[in-house]
Image (cartoon, rainbow, N blue to C red):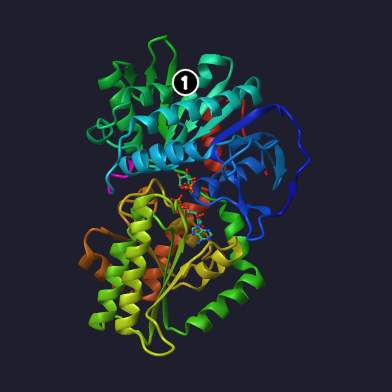
């Protein structure tokens, strides 16, 4: 966190407004009861923060803590407008409907989605609060960009009171096929909510196609290619905009003497010929159980020698009060403990597991220290970790093992591709990535880096905002 200015300003007005469940900074309470701010977790904030830093706008979101409404403030050069959530709303809207209904349903139902009417009621109520906040902050004719699955009702709610606005929506996670989406008791309300936007963005063409098909079949909207017409005669569009990262920022970090020195220190500490690396929010969509099982088997069979190879897995604490996440943490810690207990010796564990959040420079040092990056989600909207690793390899060395089920797989075709449900296949491809010739690795890495360098976050924002409002091109930072 660079800078927080607590000077409160009431009713800020802005011509560009981002609305997301979370602010880019979250409030944390220290042991002594005092509070501080730090960067919020997850890919949405990593991606949107640089977009917002280049704009003179406001970001509406929740502080991450229960309670009172905070005054607007400025942090990291971004005007932040907090929306409050009570403890009950955190339980029902955030942990409940957003993360125990929508999150699993939209990720192929890899965990069982729960449907509760009270959770839905809280979702409607909180979405209305975010829409009201946006209606208050947006200037006449402003552009408002609503983000992600927690706020799918906001576009329509906002349009109902502010038809003068340009409203965009971007979904950071997959949009499921009709057979899954159809389970939702409130499916029409969600479709109507999203259709309130002038432009609805998805990570992949498949997500956009799923949405457009549902508008046609469930809502009877007229749909022609990527354009749909709502019952009141308004024409909007739904398209894919694969999200990215601030490539230059990660590359600059990786080139800095401090990060290089730290990477060397990490390698010295790990003391291995080959370093495998995984880093994810501790989430059941990330394929952690399968990945760790695969490494356990490779060490057990001797295909990986625990004296020569190490697997570093970093897991960011996430949604810790939701049942599935508690279960996942227990499972992972049991698995890692078992593997290290069976296959380690004094002073040497095949898996180094860290349950913690790190600053970006430390992340860059870990990417730089890793020979093989292992990204194996069961389903993922995009996966920015894969792109960050590539951005941190300006020397064109290293190897990326990537799941077919990550949105990023559509762009990063030269990765060592795996099906995370196929443990044997994943083991073979991981070994192939380790043992491939330097020339082959370099050839793949060059092609992968070319893709991320030419498709960075600036291009993503400018593509989306240019389509939403041709007069509005984001400022060059
Ligand atoms: P998701 O959005 O589902 O969390 P992504 O891979 O798209 O997944 O984005 C994760 C983001 O969180 C990346 O920017 C990554 O650098 C960051 N991140 C992941 N783990 C950690 C960690 N332990 N400490 C700090 N940042 C992390
Ligand atoms: C993913 C979601 C984001 C979310 C982030 C972190 O990236 O797409 O909307 O903010 O995970 O999750 P959390 O529940 O901590 O906000």
In x, y percent, where is residue 235?
43, 16
Q: Main secondary structure of the magenta part?
A: loop
Asked if the stretch drawn in magenta spans residue 108, the answer is yes
Q: Is residue 290 left or right of 126 when viewed as pictured? A: left
81 over 31 or under it: above or below: above
Residue 226 is at least partly visible in this image: no
Q: Is residue 162 left or right of 175 when viewed as pictured? A: right
Which residue: 40% across, 78% down? Answer: 310
445 over 66 or under it: above or below: below
In x, y percent, where is residue 350?
37, 80
Which segment is the magenta one?
106-110
Give the SS element for disc 1.
helix
Q: Is mark 1 within 8 Å of ligand 2?
A: no
Dividing the image into 4 quarters, which one contains the C terminus? Answer: top right
Q: Is residue 400 left or right of 456 when viewed as pictured? A: left
In x, y percent, where is residue 242?
44, 43
Mark 1 surroundings within 10 Å by alpha-carbon count, few (fewer than 14), some (14 through 19), many (20 or more): many
In x, y percent, where is residue 329?
38, 61
Asked if the stretch drawn in magenta spans residue 230, the answer is no
Read off the residue under disc 1. 156
Residue 168 is at least partly visible in this image: yes
């Amino acid at each position: 966190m660079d800078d927080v200015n607590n000077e409160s300003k009431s009713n800020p007005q802005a011509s560009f407004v981002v609305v997301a469940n979370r602010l880019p900074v979250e409030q944390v309470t220290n042991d002594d009861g005092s509070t501080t701010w730090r960067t919020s977790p997850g890919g949405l904030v990593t991606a949107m923060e640089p977009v917002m830093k280049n704009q003179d706008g406001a970001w509406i979101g929740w502080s991450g803590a229960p309670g009172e409404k905070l005054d607007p403030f400025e942090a990291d050069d971004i005007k932040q407008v907090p929306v409050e959530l009570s403890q009950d709303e955190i339980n029902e809207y955030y942990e409940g409907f957003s993360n125990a209904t929508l999150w699993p349903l939209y990720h192929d139902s890899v965990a069982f989605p729960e449907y509760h009417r009270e959770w839905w009621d809280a979702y409607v109520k909180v979405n209305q609060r975010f829409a009201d906040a946006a209606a208050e902050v947006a200037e006449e004719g402003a552009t408002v960009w609503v983000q992600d699955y927690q706020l799918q009702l906001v576009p329509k709610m906002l349009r109902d009171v502010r038809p003068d606005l340009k409203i965009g929506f971007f979904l950071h996670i997959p949009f499921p096929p009709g057979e899954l989406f159809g389970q939702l008791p409130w499916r029409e309300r969600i479709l109507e909510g999203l259709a309130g936007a002038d432009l609805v963005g998805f990570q992949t063409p498949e997500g956009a196609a799923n949405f457009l098909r549902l508008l046609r079949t469930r809502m009877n909207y007229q749909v022609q290619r990527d354009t749909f017409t709502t019952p009141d005669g308004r024409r909007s569009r739904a398209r894919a905009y694969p999200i990215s990262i601030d490539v230059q920022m990660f590359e600059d970090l990786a080139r800095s003497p401090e990060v290089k020195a730290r990477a060397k220190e990490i390698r010295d500490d790990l003391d291995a010929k080959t370093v495998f690396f995984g880093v994810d929010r501790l989430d059941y969509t990330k394929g952690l159980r399968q990945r760790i099982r695969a490494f356990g088997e490779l060490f057990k069979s001797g295909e990986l020698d625990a004296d020569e190879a190490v697997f570093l897995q970093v897991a960011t604490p996430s949604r810790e009060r939701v049942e599935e996440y508690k279960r996942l943490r227990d499972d992972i810690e049991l698995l890692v403990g078992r593997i290290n207990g069976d296959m380690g010796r004094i002073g040497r564990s095949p898996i180094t597991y860290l349950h913690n959040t790190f600053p970006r420079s430390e992340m860059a040092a870990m990417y730089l220290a890793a020979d093989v990056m292992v990204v194996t989600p069961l389903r993922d909207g995009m996966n920015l970790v894969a792109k960050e690793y590539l951005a941190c390899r300006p020397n064109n060395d290293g190897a990326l093992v990537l799941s077919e089920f990550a949105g990023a797989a559509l762009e990063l075709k030269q990765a060592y591709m795996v099906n995370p449900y196929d443990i044997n296949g994943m083991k073979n491809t991981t070994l192939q990535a380790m043992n491939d010739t330097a020339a082959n690795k370099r050839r793949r890495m060059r092609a992968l880096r070319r893709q991320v360098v030419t498709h960075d976050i600036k291009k993503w924002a400018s593509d989306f905002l240019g389509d939403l409002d041709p007069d509005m091109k984001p400022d060059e930072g």
